[in-house]
Image (tube, helix red, strand yellow):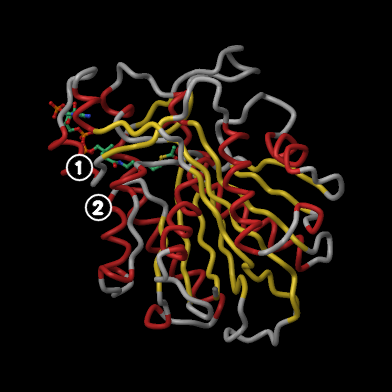
Amino acid sequence: MIRSVVQGCGAYLPARVVTNDELAKKVDTSDEWIRQRTGIRQRHIAAEGEFTSHLALKASERALADAQLKPSDLDLIVLATATPDETFPATATRVQSALGMTRGAAFDVQAVCAGFVYGMSVADSMLKNGLASTALVIGAETFSRILDWNDRGTCVLFGDGAGAVVLKAETGTGTSADRGVLANALHSDGRQHDILYVDGGPSSTRTTGFLRMEGKEVFKHAIVNMAAVVTEVLDRAGLAPTDIDWLVPHQANKRIIDGTGRKLGLSPDQVVVTVDKHANTSAASIPLALETAASDGRIKKGDLVLLEGIGGGLAWGASLVRW
Ligand code: ACO
């Protein structure tokens, strides 16, 4: 049985850090409100002229270095983003050419904050089907470009960044002891479109638009859907919550993260939290958190890591990975 085994990971954050206090000078908010409701203390914001592809490229170079592989070893790039450089072509092709990779396929997937688990699932399926052998899965976003900086209900919640993992097809035994992606689960519910969307687009308005969110509604769906999808992905792999070493959730809100950890019966120190430093970086949040916990030595080879996320669509999913 083919397994998509993680060879390395990398991350990149723009240099500029914006604190809650700095935001409170521009909109009617406070550090206390933001921290209490979300756990966010600061976010990184891309510089003028710094695009999603630039962040993605830096994270990818670091992931390749960590994997001790060269761009010429890759034959697939899947880039999850809701903030592409351009409407087309795919931002993944920008990364492909900047890396100097001249073969294989590079394309974007769009599932907003669930984008990274969607990307993992697509790449895993392609590796398993023999369509590729070594894949770069990237989550990269510049959400600062689609925020309405006058809307305090949304502008305080998001940040920019990128993370990437390298997956390589290797032969496993087919048991849950194998390293690699053990199971994925994906869902969407288009009926919930209006609770989280961008009010622009090339076909509808010929504008880029701004992010609009009914936070309370999204919160309710997030709690229910995250609990269901983590159970589903564990069942698929024939594993139990007690087998999990690390929960690496999408970093939108500390309260949602804590709720999912509690439902799984995990201790707080098994849950990787970066929302305080990065805010919600949408598709980039899971690989940024993964890189944080892998590089500081928490996540080790052989550990069972559960990734999960939900975002606009609504779209949500989970991946279970033996590191
Ligand atoms: N500062 C101060 N006050 C604020 C702010 C702010 N930044 N934003 C809103 N408020 C006020 C509101 O106006 C409201 O005031 P009112 O009671 O006088 O009307 C009050 O605070 C409460 O607002 P709520 O929106 O009800 O606050 P809530 O407790 O729901 O927290 C939050 C809002 C943080 C957005 C929360 O609902 C949440 O995290 N939702 C989930 C978001 C999420 O998970 N998104 C994931 C996907 S993102 C993606 O896919 C792109």
Q: Quadrant of ligand 1?
A: top left
The residue closer to the viewer here, 162 or 190, is 162
Q: Which residue shows up at 62% across the image and 73% down it?
A: 180
- What amino acid does circle 1 point to? Arg
Q: Which residue is labeled 2 in the image?
A: 255
**Image location (x, y in percent) of residue 101:** 80, 46
The total of numbered circles placed on residues is: 2
Residue 210 is left or right of residue 156, and the answer is right
Mark 2 C-beta closer than 8 Å to ligand 1: yes
Q: Is residue 93 above or below residue 203?
A: below
Q: Is residue 277 above or below residue 213?
A: below
CA neighbours of label 2 inside 10 A, class few (<14), some (14 to 19), many (20+):
some
Q: Is residue 226 above or below residue 310?
A: below
Mark 1 C-beta closer than 8 Å to ligand 1: yes
**Image location (x, y in percent) of residue 37:** 20, 42
Residue contact between numbered discs 1 and 2, judged by CB atoms under 8 Å: yes
The residue closer to the viewer here, 164 or 37, is 164
The residue closer to the viewer here, 1 or 230, is 1
Residue 246 is left or right of residue 200, and the answer is left
CA neighbours of label 1 inside 10 A, class few (<14), some (14 to 19), many (20+):
few
Q: CA distance from mark 1 to mark 2?
A: 8 Å
Q: Which residue shows up at 24% across the image and 17% down it?
A: 26
**Image location (x, y in percent) of residue 55:** 56, 38
Q: Is residue 162 above or below residue 208?
A: below
Residue 37 bears which disc, if any?
1
Q: Quadrant location of residue 243? A: bottom left
Furthest-right residue in this view: 103
Q: Which residue shows up at 24% across the image and 41% down it?
A: 41
